[in-house]
Amino acid sequence: MKLWDKGFSTDKKIDHFTVGNDRELDLLLAKYDVIASTAHAKMLAKVGLISEDEGIALEKELKFILGTIEQGTFTIEDDFEDMHSKIEFLLTERLGDIGKKIHSARSRNDQVLVAMQLFLKEELNEIKSQVKALFDLLIELAEKHQQVLLPGYTHLQIAMPSSFGLWFSAYAESLVDDLYFVQAAYKVADQNPLGSAAGYGSSFPIDRTFTTEELGFETLKYNVVAAQMGRGKVEKATAFGISSIAATLSKLAMDITLYMSQNFDFISFPNELTTGSSIMPHKKNPDVFELIRAKCNKIQAVPNQLTLITNNLPSGYHRDLQLVKESIVPALQDMKACLEMMTFSLKEIRVNQNILNDPKYDYLFSVDTLNEMVKNGMPFRDAYKTMGTAIENGTFKPNKDIEHSHEGSLGNLKLNEIENKFKVIWNA
């Protein structure tokens, strides 16, 4: 069944090419198409395009279909082009002509728009919750290990003392920045496009304010052309949001992979969170974190994919837009999996308490030793030269009794302030 069926068949190759993997992706989106269809049916009854009894009948059958989706028994067979055609078929099969009336005053274009935006809103909220779980864990780890020193690097050369408290809370505060992008994406998605039909509105006297309130959107996408132009744009906004999180997770995964190696030996994990080698019995590989890194790097490519699909399209609907679904939906699933696995694994992290006892890290304290000279009255440039000469001559003696007290330094992490910053964006 095709919603655009005019009584003749298209070539099977054309069908296969144009439908693509829509059926598989639509199994994730069908719930939201049913929710939107229910609101649409209520609106049709409200404005008198169908009777009150017809509206009730449609609501009842849509509720039944929603139940099959939630139970996992809903399918989209090859006879159907997508979720829309299968749902309308089921309504017509059970209600006859009443089922055929559900498509009045809408198009498959605004059906896709509203289902996708409802889906994205829910996905973004779920991702926000996962980010919060990771944030809370990082703050907890920062507090627990704030006194444990860790080498800080620039150019992968040892630079200055850091700490596990500083390292964990750095990623926590980075997640705050990521949520700004996620929140912006949510605002873009939280505009009701239903009623824009094929992109030019309808001659039916529909009530778009009613469906906006019924579906829980913050506002209406008023201009019907603008609503249609939102397809691809809302997905791209979402992609930017999750790609920001992905960048943070990828960097954290890279740090963990380095720090687990024998050359660093800063952290470790229980055996059950690592993998072995087929020939090297000593190996404890960080496969989980390598895959998080790779998957998150893939996610960071999604905004560019969506840009290349949509950047030269004029206004109005074009079939190119079908492809944005197959970029954003898997990316969201990968994002949730990466957040889940990072949080799950980090709960078991083991921290090396005595890293800086190794003499190779003595030069980490050169800046702090230099700063003591400055505090005692020596001009900075003279202290710098004196320190450089001592290092060159092998007479440098580190002052390891360091004190970093300014806001955000290893001696003053400001964890409460970082938590408050997170709360502000969380409640926005």
Image (cartoon, rainbow, N blue to C red):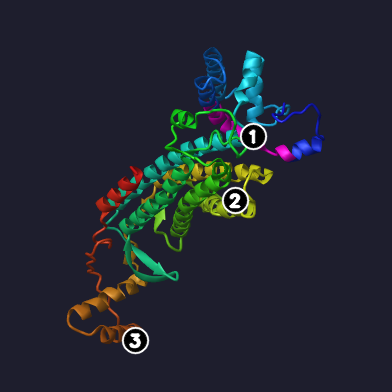
User: Residue 41 falls in which quadrant of the image?
Assistant: top right
Any mark on residue 24, and which? 1
- Secondary element at tag 1: helix
Q: Residue at x 46, y 40 (%)?
A: 190
Badge 1 or badge 3: first in the primary sequence:
1
- Secondary element at tag 2: helix
Q: Position of residue 247 (x, y in %)?
A: 48, 55
Question: Can see residue 377?
Answer: yes
The Cα atoms of the two marked residues, 1 and 2, are separated by 20 Å
> Looking at the image, which is closer to me, 159 or 83?
83
In the image, taking residue 68 as reference, residue 346 lies left or right, namely left
Amino acid carrying mark 2 in the image: Leu
Any mark on residue 393, and which? 3
Label 1 with label 2: CB-CB less than 8 Å: no
Q: Residues within 10 Å of mark 2 (few under 14, many from 20)?
A: many
Question: Can see residue 347?
Answer: no
Q: Which residue is mark 2?
A: 306
Q: Residues within 10 Å of mark 3 (few under 14, many from 20)?
A: few
Q: Is residue 137 magenta?
A: no
Q: Position of residue 205 (x, y in %)?
A: 54, 28
Badge 1 or badge 2: first in the primary sequence:
1
Give the magenta-colored segment's residue range. Answer: 18-36
Q: Residue pushed farthest top?
A: 53
Looking at the magenta stretch, what is its main secondary structure? helix
User: Residue 428 falls in which quadrant of the image?
Assistant: top left
> Which quadrant of the figure contains the N terminus?
top right
Badge 3 or badge 2: first in the primary sequence:
2
Number of the front mark, 1 or 3: 1
> Looking at the image, which is closer to me, 78 or 344?
78
> Compared to 421, does 76 lie above or below?
above
Q: Is residue 29 magenta?
A: yes
